[in-house]
Structures are given as structure tokens and as C-alpha cells.
């Protein structure tokens, strides 16, 4: 029996002078062997037929009752999220609490979206199950992100196989085992393992892949899914820009960019990655950013006042350092922090003078870094903001004319004087940040087959 071990990210440390590291194990789970996949898929197919035959209202009752079981384990779930991913316990409780509290509303919204529509006296639109949906979820929000894809897939009458990140297997195990106390057998199954198992799952006899992760992984999934013409819904990260115009409320802009850059230690797909500020207000803006950023406390999840945890693993830690070192070598000015931090933390860092040839400009950082560049003309800021393969979120701070600037930005979610993707809007990326989307009626329907019935 093969096992997957979960490690405390705050405990990573180098051994000697080489590249070897060690960490404290939290626990382990049994992995699914690739040769076991056909059996799992066969049981998912058998279970899906009976599940799909239930009226939508009955499926909704099952799902809501299953999510109610999470109340009894919510503290354990929050602790596991902190232990496995590293985020502070307060944020972990928000993730768990939001998932539980919104479950009934979410299920009702999906049910309504998938209800038969009458177009006229002779024609109806039906939303039918696709079959088996593979949900491949990330580590940065291991409960919320899995839930956003898993619930609409289930409610549509599909059976679901969840392949969670190798970084957070214990969260996934508790989550799925708890739901399965209520759900019919094999409607929801768990496939624990590394990316090799994920690749085998995508290539297997399934009908859809719902994925949140990197652009590179998304491209591999598309290629593997193509022979079977499998449905895809994928959110593939971002490199979100913020434009701060001379007419902006500087204090509001500072609060937003610092909070967004540091949330979840910067390990968030809609984290602010690039800031373009009008040179007329840049000095004041940068001073206030440094003042606010210096108040953030770095440490382990269970330490009081900590609001920036560790990088999830040494690979991510090294990636952030390489981007900071690249910026320094190319003339970036460090207003706070440095380009050299020992495992496992990255201290709050503010870098000014970002240029288009820097990694901080064109790659997703996923670390607690505020990267600032100045502009003279607004057209320059718009051009640099759009000069990216990514197009998830974007934000503009400004007075008159801010909306006109925002309308020129190439992103799926754009905010004016606030964050992108607010309210009940769908979660959608443009360009290479997404294929399909989830959330709202239109997003829920992507987990179903539309069928036109004419009488």
C-alpha cells in the first residue's frame, strides 16, 4: 500500500549546505494506484445512473444534509487547512465557515439554474448529467476551491471523482469522508495521489474535467482530454494588475494593494501582482505602502497576530526568491525586505522600479510581494497591464475616467475602486487564465448537457 505524507509547511528547513530539506510530517493517506482507476470509474458509472434518476429536489436534499455534517468537524477542518497549507487559523476558519454557511444557498441556486426551461408552448430546455466529472483542486484554498467545482457537478446528476492537491490530502479526506456519511455510495469518490494519478484520471473514461491550477498543467489537461472530446472548465491562475490614477483615493488604493498582495501569503490567484501608479502620486503611494506593509507579522498559523504564513513548500519559496533576485539584478529598488529569505517564510516585501523584462512583471509570483512601477501616461499603464498571457482579474483606482480605463483592460473580472469578482458574479478568466467558468446560473450549466425537447 502506497501512502502520501502531508508536511507542515512552517517546518521546512535546509539540511547542510546542499539542496536537501526536511520537514515535520502531519499525517498520511492511502493513495490510489493507477491500476485501481478502472474499478473506481466503473463504480462511479454505476452510482451515477441511480443518482441522475433522482428528482433535482431530492438530490438537493441529499447535498444539503451532507454539508450539514461538516458542522461537527469544522474546527478540525480549519486546523488541518492551517497545518497543511500554512494559512493562519483565522483565515482557515473563514474558509470552512463560508463553505458550510453558504451550502444551502449554493445548492438552491444550482437547483434553480438546472431546472427545465420552457421556451414556448412546444419547446423546453433540459439540463442533463454529463456522467463522470473529475474535479482536480488546488492547495491554496483546499476546501473552498474543491467545493466550488464539486457541488455543481453533483447537483447536475453527475458522479464526481475528486483528485486533491498532494499538499493538502488530509483536508480532502476529512471533507469527502464527512459528505459520504450521507451521500449515496460511490456518487462522490476520492483519488489521492500525485500528478501521475491526475494525468491518468484525465485520460481515463470520464466525461468532464473541472480544474483549478497552473496554466502549464491546464495545457497538459487540454491535450490529454482532446482525444475524448471531454468537457473542460479550468481556472488557470493570474497575474493581476492594478492601475492607480492620479485622481485615486491613495489611502484606499494602498489598503487594497497591500491586503491583496499579502492575503494567504500572496498564494492566491487574484492576488495583486503588478501595480502601475501615476508618477505624480507615486512617492506618497510608495511611502504609505511601506508603512502599512511593515505592520504585517510573519509566522506559524497558531501564533498570535500572524497574518502571513509560510510558502507552501520549498519549490514555491524558491520561485519567489528567484523572481526577487531577478528584479534586484535588473534594477529593482527594495523599499521593504530583500531578495534572500531562509525557508520557509517570505517576509513582506515591497519592490519599486519594476520593468517589463522582470519576472515580477510577466510571471505569477504567488508570494507576499508588492511590485510597483510608475507611469507618465495612462495609455502606458493600460498597455503594460494588458501585456500578459493572463487575464483573470484587474483593478483600477481613480476618479473621473477610471471606468473608461477599466473597460480597456483584458481580464475576466475587473473592479473599479474595489476588488474584482465581487458579489454573486461568476468566477471567470480571460485569455490564458480560464476556459469556461463557474458560478451563477451560466456557470452551473457548464456541468450539464443542454437538451432541446420539442413536443
Image (tube, rainbow, N blue to C red):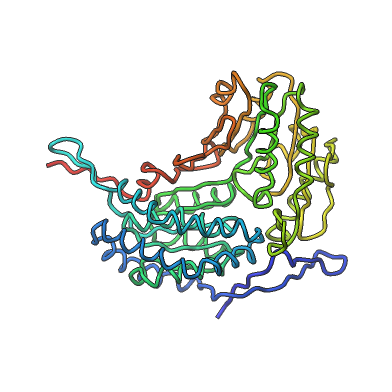
Where in the figure is residue 160, as x and y percent of width and height? 40, 62
Q: Position of residue 241 (x, y in %)?
A: 64, 34
Indicate whether 360 appears above or below 46: above
Residue projecting furthest to the front: 304
Along the line of sight, the residue nearer the viewer: 197 or 235: 235
Residue in the picture at 84% in, 37% down = 333
Residue 14 in the image: state x and y as whole percent: 81, 66
Q: In which quadrant of the rendered image does the C terminus lie?
A: top left
In which quadrant of the rendered view does residue 3 lie?
A: bottom right
Question: From what the image shows, is residue 207 above or below residue 376?
Answer: below
Query: Would residue 31 appear left or right of 263 to someone viewing this image?
Result: left
Which residue corresponds to the image point at 67% horizontal and 33% vertical from the top-left? 253
**Relative depth, front residue between 256 and 319:** 256
Classify residue 61 as left or right of residue 316.
left
The residue furthest bottom is: 1
Instruction: Name the quarter where the N terminus is drawn.
Output: bottom right
Along the line of sight, which residue is nearer the eye, 164 or 148?
148
Task: Count all numbered tags in the image, as a single digit.
Answer: 0
Q: In which quarter of the image is residue 418?
A: top right
Q: Position of residue 45 (x, y in %)?
A: 33, 66
Amino acid at each position: 500500500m502506497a501512502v502520501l505524507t502531508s508536511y507542515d509547511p512552517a517546518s521546512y528547513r535546509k539540511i547542510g549546505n546542499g539542496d536537501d530539506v526536511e520537514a515535520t510530517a502531519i499525517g498520511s493517506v492511502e493513495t490510489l494506484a493507477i491500476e485501481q482507476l478502472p474499478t473506481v470509474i466503473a463504480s462511479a458509472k454505476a452510482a451515477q445512473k441511480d443518482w441522475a434518476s433522482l428528482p433535482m429536489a431530492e438530490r438537493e436534499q441529499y447535498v444539503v444534509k451532507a454539508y450539514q455534517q461538516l458542522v461537527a468537524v469544522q474546527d478540525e477542518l480549519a486546523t488541518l487547512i492551517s497545518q497543511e497549507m500554512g494559512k493562519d487559523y483565522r483565515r482557515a476558519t473563514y474558509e470552512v465557515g463560508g463553505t458550510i454557511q453558504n451550502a444551502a444557498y449554493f445548492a438552491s441556486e444550482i437547483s434553480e439554474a438546472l431546472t427545465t426551461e420552457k421556451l414556448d408552448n412546444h419547446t423546453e430546455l433540459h439540463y442533463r448529467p454529463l456522467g463522470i466529472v473529475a474535479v482536480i483542486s488546488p492547495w491554496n484554498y483546499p476546501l473552498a476551491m474543491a467545493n466550488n467545482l464539486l457541488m455543481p457537478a453533483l447537483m447536475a446528476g453527475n458522479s464526481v471523482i475528486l483528485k486533491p492537491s498532494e499538499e493538502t490530502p488530509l483536508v480532502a479526506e476529512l471533507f469527502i469522508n464527512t459528505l459520504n456519511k450521507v451521500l449515496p455510495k460511490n456518487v462522490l469518490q476520492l483519488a489521492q495521489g500525485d500528478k501521475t494519478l491526475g494525468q491518468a484520471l484525465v485520460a481515463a473514461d470520464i466525461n468532464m474535467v473541472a480544474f483549478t491550477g497552473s496554466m502549464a498543467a491546464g495545457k497538459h489537461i487540454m491535450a490529454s482530454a482532446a482525444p475524448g472530446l471531454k468537457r473542460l472548465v479550468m481556472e488557470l491562475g493570474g497575474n493581476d494588475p492594478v492601475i492607480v490614477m492620479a485622481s485615486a483615493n491613495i489611502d484606499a488604493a494602498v489598503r487594497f494593494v497591500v491586503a491583496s498582495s499579502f492575503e494567504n501569503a500572496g498564494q492566491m490567484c487574484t492576488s495583486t501582482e503588478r501595480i502601475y501608479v501615476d508618477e505624480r502620486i507615486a512617492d506618497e503611494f510608495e511611502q504609505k505602502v511601506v508603512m502599512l506593509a511593515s505592520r504585517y507579522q510573519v509566522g506559524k498559523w497558531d501564533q498570535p497576530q500572524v497574518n502571513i504564513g509560510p510558502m507552501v513548500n520549498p519549490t514555491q519559496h524558491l520561485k519567489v526568491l528567484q523572481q526577487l533576485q531577478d528584479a534586484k539584478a535588473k534594477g529593482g529598488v527594495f523599499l521593504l525586505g530583500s531578495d534572500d529569505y531562509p525557508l520557509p517564510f517570505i517576509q513582506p516585501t515591497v519592490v519599486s522600479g519594476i520593468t517589463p523584462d522582470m519576472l515580477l512583471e510577466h510571471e505569477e509570483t504567488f508570494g507576499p510581494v508588492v511590485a510597483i512601477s510608475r507611469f507618465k501616461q495612462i495609455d502606458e499603464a493600460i498597455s503594460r497591464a494588458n501585456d500578459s498571457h493572463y487575464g483573470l482579474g484587474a483593478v483600477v483606482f481613480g476618479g473621473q475616467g477610471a471606468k473608461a480605463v477599466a473597460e480597456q483592460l483584458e481580464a475576466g473580472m475587473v473592479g473599479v475602486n474595489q476588488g474584482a469578482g465581487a458579489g454573486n458574479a461568476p468566477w471567470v478568466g480571460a485569455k490564458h487564465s480560464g476556459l469556461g467558468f463557474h458560478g451563477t446560473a451560466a456557470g452551473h450549466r457548464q456541468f450539464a448537457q443542454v437538451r432541446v425537447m420539442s413536443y
